[in-house]
Image (tube, helix red, strand yellow):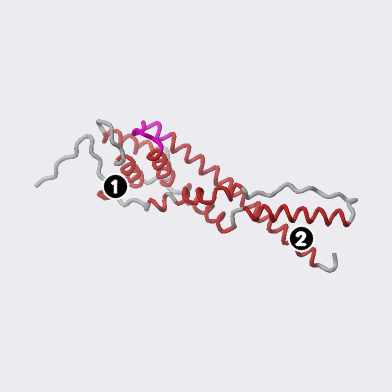
Amino acid sequence: MADHPLSSTTIVPLEQRPAATADPRKLLKIEHLLREHGRSVARTYFPTLRAGGLRDTPERRALLEAEHRDALEAMLAGAASMSTLEAISDALGAALGAEPDEGVIEGCLAALIDTRVRVPHNLPIYLEALIYDLRDEGFPPAVVAAACQRIRRESKFLPEISEVLTTCRETLARYREQQQRVSEALVARRKAERWLSDMTCTAQDPVQ
């Protein structure tokens, strides 16, 4: 017996789609990492340290060094660990470097639309146009997944295509900004650790 054709308001559920869809947990890994470690990443920076002068006395230099050590140790105490920063950096790099995937796009849209009470009268046309636009703009799979999750949680109605594209652009811009921020945090943490190490070596060197 032949299958009944799909109506104009039918979308195949995510679990029935033949195309292999990436694991949502992997696609949303960046969201979990940023939610868990975002504050500690923001606290990872090289603090402003007062500079010494050529005419400083040994006592003055010792006070400045103690002040510098306290500032660096305080920053590192609240900062993201090196392993965390590297994990976020790797995840962002992999996500932003990924090619668009139509199967992932379809899966994310299916999960989004299946949660809606109202859908367009001509859903196949809506989906075809949206899939084309998302692929044409070159959004990586992780960006599409995060944008669809945000829309699903924040929007009461099925969004216009332009709204989906805007959310994807905002997500892409946020990921790029976070990639830059994490890169700066890695540099800051390495520099702070190196300074503390140099201070320790200097303090232990009997020649100094």
The quarter of the picture where residue 190 lies is bottom right
Q: Residues within 10 Å of mark 1 (few under 14, many from 20)?
A: some
Vertical order, 201 against 137 (above or below): below
- Image coordinates of residue 9 in percent, x first then y, are 23, 35
Amino acid at circle 2: Met
Amino acid at circle 1: Leu
Label drawn at residue 169: none
The quarter of the picture where residue 11 lies is top left
Label drawn at residue 14: 1
Q: Which residue is mark 2?
A: 199
Please name the residue shown 84% across and 69% down the image: 206
Q: Residues within 10 Å of mark 2 (few under 14, many from 20)?
A: some
Q: Is residue 204 left or right of residue 179?
A: right
> Quick one: SS at disc 1?
helix
First along the sequence among labels 1 and 2: 1
Q: Is residue 152 left or right of residue 53?
A: left
- Image coordinates of residue 141 in percent, x first then y, are 41, 46
Please name the residue shown 83% across and 57% down the image: 62
Q: In front: 171, or 157?
A: 157
The residue segment tinted magenta is 154-165
- Image coordinates of residue 177 in percent, x first then y, are 55, 42
Q: Name the quadrant of the C terminus.
A: bottom right
Q: Residue furthest bottom?
A: 206
Please name the residue shown 65% across and 49% down the image: 45
> Quick one: SS at disc 2?
helix
Vertical order, 169 against 186 (above or below): above
Q: Residue 153: within the magenta? A: no
Count the labels in the image: 2
